[in-house]
Image (cartoon, grey):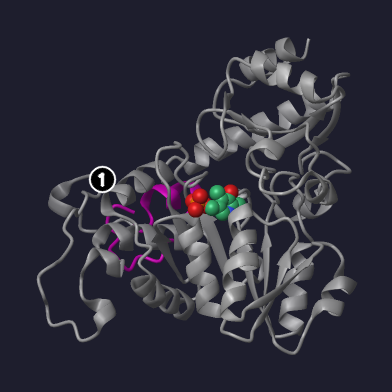
Amino acid sequence: MAKQDDAFPGKGEIETSVVHDGEKRPLVEGAVTLPIFQSSTFEYAGEENYDDLRYIRLNNTPNHLALGRKIASLEKAEAGMVMSSGMAAISTALMTVLSPGDHLLALAGLYGGTHDLLSNYLSRFGIDHDWVDGRDVSEWERKLRPETKAFYVESITNPLMQVPDLPGVVGFAADNQLLSLIDNTFATPVNFRPLELGFDLVLHSATKYLNGHSDIVGGAVAGSGRMIKNITSNLNLLGGSMDPHTCFLLHRGMKTLLVRVRHQNTSAAKIAEFLDQHSSVKRVYYPGLVGCCGHSTAKSLFGGYGGMLSFELSGGEEDTNRFMERLHLPILAPSLGGVESLVVCPAKTTHAGLSTREREAIGISETLIRFSVGIESTSDLIFDLEQALA
Ligand SMILES: *Cc1c(COP(=O)(O)O)cnc(C)c1O
């Protein structure tokens, strides 16, 4: 491992890959961690293409390249790239694979930013879409058009933690010559590697688990070398580049991805079970619970069920507010995937842009609570939940 060079393909176990793959060799001045190349421009060395000139916006500093290789290694992809945010990754990828006149099948209840990008923005450029249920193949067939180009899903939906029929999506896309894209933010490559199942492109908000410390915003994509090259060319024009200092923080965060997510998998599973058995809890959404959220799909494909869960209390809005106020450890905040536990009421925050009726149509009640399990002690978290429920 220590002798690997830039081209080392990475054959190790994922625990080893996350630490060693993609690292620049030989070490720069012997530094064990890759230094920050905080230089906007680099000396001209005879490059012939614009995209090859070395400049931070062109996404090719040593910090960008190392992270691209690391995300590719984790997702078992030919290539990868990081961007300035999850939305930069999603918008740049969609604007690369879709052109005016194209149509997209997209999972209903996507992350709010992606939902609005499709509804309010790409529609202005003549890119149309239909929302589909993640498990209803006959609906996919009904909504398929000659101009349908791609199928876009998430590995676990927010906030109801539903796992779509992922093998079905891959099969349907292949049968109909569609590109299959998946936002793998919630599952992480620790638990699920969509390219191994046959997805064409995987996207991440690196803000969440990849970085894991709630201190940066970032995005990532992984897929074939050709696709990542095209996306990077467009990123160079659209401008959503990650700053090298942010690259450094993401790089540092990613090295502990495995230990964090494994702990979060175990802890969230115990918390979901605790809540599921509690008399004051009406319903728990967690893909690890039998009979919930596409559990059998998750069981057959995932190495773990993740650190995200949501639940509803038996009482009404007032009880829910009181419960949230009584929690000591989880911080009341949107976002997820960090080392500290966070709770949020989606109806008041992430999904506040929808009307009550729209929220009810997609199953989000006013009292739903979403819980991003951190790396604190599981028993401390359960103790805290127990006292707040009492
Ligand atoms: C947060 C999030 C995004 C957007 O990522 P940003 O880094 O905030 O731009 C996209 N998809 C999912 C599933 C997310 O949770």
Residue 200 left/right relative to 269: left
Q: Which corner quadrant of the image does residue 266 belong to? A: top right
What x and y, as percent, mark residue 118?
62, 67
Tag 1 secondary structure: loop
What x and y, as percent, mark residue 282?
87, 28
Which residue sits at x=57%, y=37%? 334
What x and y, as percent, mark residue 254?
42, 46
Observer-nearest of 75 and 331: 331
Q: Neighbour class for label 1 at 10 Å: few (<14), some, many (≥20)?
A: few
- Identify the amino acid type marked 1: Thr
Observer-nearest of 167 and 17: 167
Q: Which corner quadrant of the image does residue 310 belong to? A: top right
Which residue sits at x=64%, y=32%? 344
| The magenta segment | 1-22
Chief secondary structure of the magenta portion: loop
251 lies above or below 140: above
Residue 369 left/right relative to 45: right
Q: Mark 1 points at which residue?
A: 33
Which residue sits at x=82%, y=77%? 143
Observer-nearest of 144 and 18: 144
Which residue sits at x=65%, y=42%? 306
Residue 321 left/right relative to 53: right
Q: Quadrant of the N terminus?
A: bottom left
Q: Is 21 contained in the magenta span?
A: yes
